[in-house]
């Protein structure tokens, strides 16, 4: 009997009626609350199974937010999955690959070196989807002689001072620029290093040198500078979406499916 199990009288009884005691009323109130919580817990579990709630950790490179696709994907995902918390973390490509392997992020927008080569062999447990390809562009002062050209051959930059990300930044573009320079027959002269693209562009405007960046930075308008595509073969950079192989998380699957559907 329920009353015996809980050790309290829940009902007052007579031959003609039964009614709740004060203990019974409180028990009924709590029981209804517990049943509602149980149903809510079940619904939360079902929503989590569908990838409709939880936290998704997303890495992205410095240049990714300047790509319109990134904003489109993030905004669309927020609209479709409003109860998922997005944790967005700006990280260089190599750092993202490491963070993915260590389960510190769930997906990453990366720019690998030319040819899809990925650093230090830590890419083996990862899967990649190509989202878009951008040209590499020379960032030049508007007064520079090469600014008159529609496209700039790498060999024409042999005598220029380069403003680049430092190797320690772990960007995919750094080794790619070195390879393009070597293919054109020269080793770049590094005039200045900076971790931030807007700083690099500002230094070009200040006459400290030239730079090469992904074409997505076209959207940064800065007095005194211009962008010209690099003419050489292979002077493009891909934006990839990286995830762990075998990651069956509904959160990840939903995000990857949405992003891939916008390509």
Image (cartoon, rainbow, N blue to C red):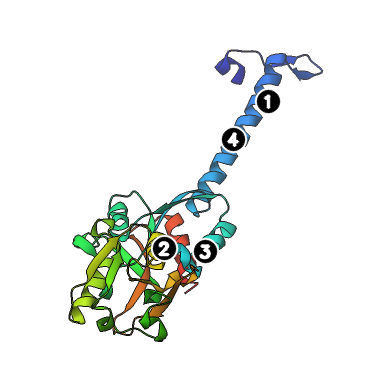
Q: Quick check: 207 left or right of 113?
A: right
Going from N to C along the chain, the mark reached first, 2 or 1, is: 1
* Position in image of residue 236 (x %, y %): 34, 77
Which residue carries the number 3 mark? Answer: 71
Marks 4 and 2, Cα distance to the nearest angstrom?
56 Å
Q: Quick check: 256 left or right of 19?
A: left
- Residue visible at 67% across and 25% down? 28
Which residue carries the number 1 mark? Answer: 29
Going from N to C along the chain, the mark reached first, 4 or 2, is: 4
- Describe the element under mark 4 as helix, strand or loop: helix
Marks 3 and 1, Cα distance to the nearest angstrom?
47 Å
Marks 1 and 4, Cα distance to the nearest angstrom?
12 Å
As rendered, which of 137 and 226 lies closer to the eye? Answer: 226
Q: Quadrant of residue 4?
A: top right
- Residue visible at 40% across and 76% down? 134
- Residue visible at 38% across and 59% down? 108
Marks 3 and 2, Cα distance to the nearest angstrom?
24 Å
Marks 3 and 4, Cα distance to the nearest angstrom?
37 Å
Disc 4 crowd rating (10 Å Cα; few below 14, some 14-19, many 20+) is: few
């Amino acid at each position: 009997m329920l009353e015996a199990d809980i050790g309290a009288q829940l009902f007052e009884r007579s031959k003609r009626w039964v009614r709740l005691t004060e203990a019974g009323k409180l028990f009924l109130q709590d029981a209804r609350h517990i049943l509602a919580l149980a149903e809510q817990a079940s619904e939360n579990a079902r929503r989590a199974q569908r990838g409709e709630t939880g936290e998704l950790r997303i890495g992205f490179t410095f240049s990714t937010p300047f790509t319109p696709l990134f904003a489109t994907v993030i905004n669309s995902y927020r609209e479709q999955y409003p109860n998922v918390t997005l944790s967005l973390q700006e990280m260089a490509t190599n750092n993202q690959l490491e963070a993915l392997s260590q389960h510190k992020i769930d997906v990453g927008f990366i720019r690998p070196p030319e040819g899809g080569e990925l650093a230090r062999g830590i890419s083996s447990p990862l899967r990649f989807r190509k989202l878009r390809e951008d040209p590499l562009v020379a960032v030049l002062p508007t007064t520079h002689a090469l600014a008159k050209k529609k496209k700039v051959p790498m060999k024409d930059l042999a005598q220029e001072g380069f403003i680049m990300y430092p190797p320690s930044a772990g960007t995919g573009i750094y080794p790619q620029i070195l390879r393009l320079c070597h293919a054109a027959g020269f080793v770049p002269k590094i005039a200045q290093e900076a971790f931030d693209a807007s700083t690099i562009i500002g230094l070009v405007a200040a006459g400290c040198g030239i730079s090469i960046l992904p074409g997505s930075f076209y959207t940064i308008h800065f007095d005194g500078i211009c962008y010209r595509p690099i003419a050489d073969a292979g002077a493009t950079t891909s934006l990839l979406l990286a995830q762990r192989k075998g990651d069956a998380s509904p959160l990840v699957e939903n995000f990857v499916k949405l992003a891939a559907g916008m390509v």
